[in-house]
Amino acid sequence: MDYALYQKISKVTLGKQPADLVLKNLKLVDVFTGEIVESNVAVKDGLIAGVSRRYRGKKEIDLGGKYLAPGFIDAHLHLESTMVTPNELVSTAARFGTTTFIVDPHEAANVSGAAGIDYILDQTEKSPANVYVMMPSCVPATHVDDNGGIFSANDMYPYVRNPRVLGLGEVMDDPGVINGDESMFSKLLLFENRTIDGHAPYLPNRELSAYKMAGVDTDHEATSFEYALEEVRRGIHVHIREGSAAHNLKDIVEGIVRTGIDTEYFSFCTDDKHIEDILRDGHISYNVKLAVSLGMNPVQAIKMATINTAKCYGLKHLGAISPGFQADFVVLDNLQDLNVTDVFYKGKLVDRNAPIRVKTCGRALKHTVHLDKVKAEQFVLPIGKKKTHVIGINPSQITTEDLAVSLQPAANYVPTDGYSKVAAVERHHNTGKIGVAVAKGYGIRNGAVASSVSHDSHNIIVIGDNDRDMALAVDEIIRTQGGYTVVENGEVFETLPLPIMGLMSDAGFESVNETLGRMIKKAHEMGVPADIEPFITLSFLALPVIPELRITPRGLCLLTAKGPEILQE
């Protein structure tokens, strides 16, 4: 704290002046000692001036014995993956107690480079929460990706001193790290004194050790307690993910409760969580509630949502209720149900009914689909006598399986018996690249679903049971410059335009959610199983850094120990 600010705040701390606000009659969750302390909290200029029953304030609020915890922190998320504009997502989640967001804008960077990152920073500058950014480390994610551009270490230099930039975003190119790729290490060295986020699913022990030794500090890809434990044993901070697509919390928290291990190196994140899920379940508050329902001590869960994350990212002014910390609070009715009754950001009550501002977006970011119309014959897929690699879709997970299946030889495969045809169409540079493969588990009949949200390069991905509808679906995405669409029997059922980089809509959540609800219902009526979210599941079928099989514009891709490889069938 600088001298002038100290002089101002300390007058309240020492009882010489009244506070701007005093929260009275509360049970404070002390994340340093694990105690519950009956006290009052004094606030001056958005900071905590003191914690004591002796303080008086110009304004005083009696909490009636409720619990006061630090504002929750989402350790890792992608604002672009929520379909709405960044401030709309942040403002909505803040009402459920998340007062700090650590975002990785690599989705935007993969489409629009630095302009995409600038958009995220600009859109969240005046949001009712703290929004920090990690510099995207892998743009493109791998050598097999076809994205909008390259974001190198040199491109990162202008952002290094930005106070809202905390470090390096998730390092997905683990083979590049482990094998000592020079360009990757130039990025690691640029942020060697900051936090470096990882992305390390299923690394063997030695490779995981090399990955950590290179400087990686965190990982959010642990799907089992056993793997999370291996990471923590190496000093890797594990962000336990529970979002709209991936649900990893139950297995990891049950392991923590069963073994009783220390939780200092665990935090919570959502990665990707849509507004409709936030409105129904909550945000990081849901992670805390779920952890407690699985047997975790409530204070322990709150620490994982607050001080653990703040320490991980060097946010010394956040994550606790103590003098000099920012006055970000969550009011809880009790420590069993953990219902959030009120939220304070910088000492001001967050108005849950206030209109959410949607800032305008520049024209260039609304014209990012550079692609000529496609034809049905571009989705032809010959099948030979050998067994075919088929993408096996796992419900409620973003992982897939490599299924070796004997399909009927044909000049062009026609899906039957629960199989689908899936394709990725390059959309950034109009190269004409289209990869086509077979998937099992999606189940769509008499139509197709397409999306310009396809991690992480965000080409157009389409899945269906016939070439005509697949082509029509892709052409509809071209027409709207991005979005989701459902096609049935040669006609477009409905489209949700996502014109901002092909990732987000500025039409407002209510309009987006209403349209999306109808489209999801229709996709399920067309055969998509109830335990598969049609659009989120589809978006991850193109991500080559997650096991096992993916579809890219260059063809079917298998994640191997050496990294992703295009299969030549």
Image (cartoon, rainbow, N blue to C red):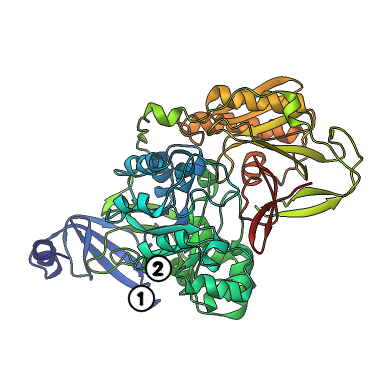
**Would you place residue 326 above or below residue 151 in this image?**
below
Seen in the image, is 525 located left or right of residue 188? right
- Counting other residues with Cα less than 10 Å from the Cα at mark 1, is it few (<14), some (14-19), or many (20 or more)? few
**Would you place residue 552 above or below residue 194 in this image?**
above
Residue marked by disc 2 = 312
**Marks 1 and 2, how far apart in space?**
15 Å
Residue marked by disc 1 = 32
Seen in the image, is 476 located left or right of residue 115? right
Three-letter amino acid code at disc 2? Answer: Cys
Do we see residue 256 in this rendering?
no
Q: Farthest top residue? A: 491
Tag 1's secondary structure?
Answer: loop
Where residue 260 sits in the image (x, y, percent)?
A: 56, 80
Q: Residue at x 88, y 42 (%)?
A: 384
In the image, 82 versus 335, the foreground residue is: 82
Kindly indicate whether the residue at mark 2 contacts the one at mark 1 (C-beta within 8 angstroms).
Answer: no
Count the numbered circles shown: 2
Q: Tell me the quarter of the picture where residue 449 sits.
A: top right
Q: Residue at x 26, y 66 (%)?
A: 40
Q: Farthest front residue? A: 182
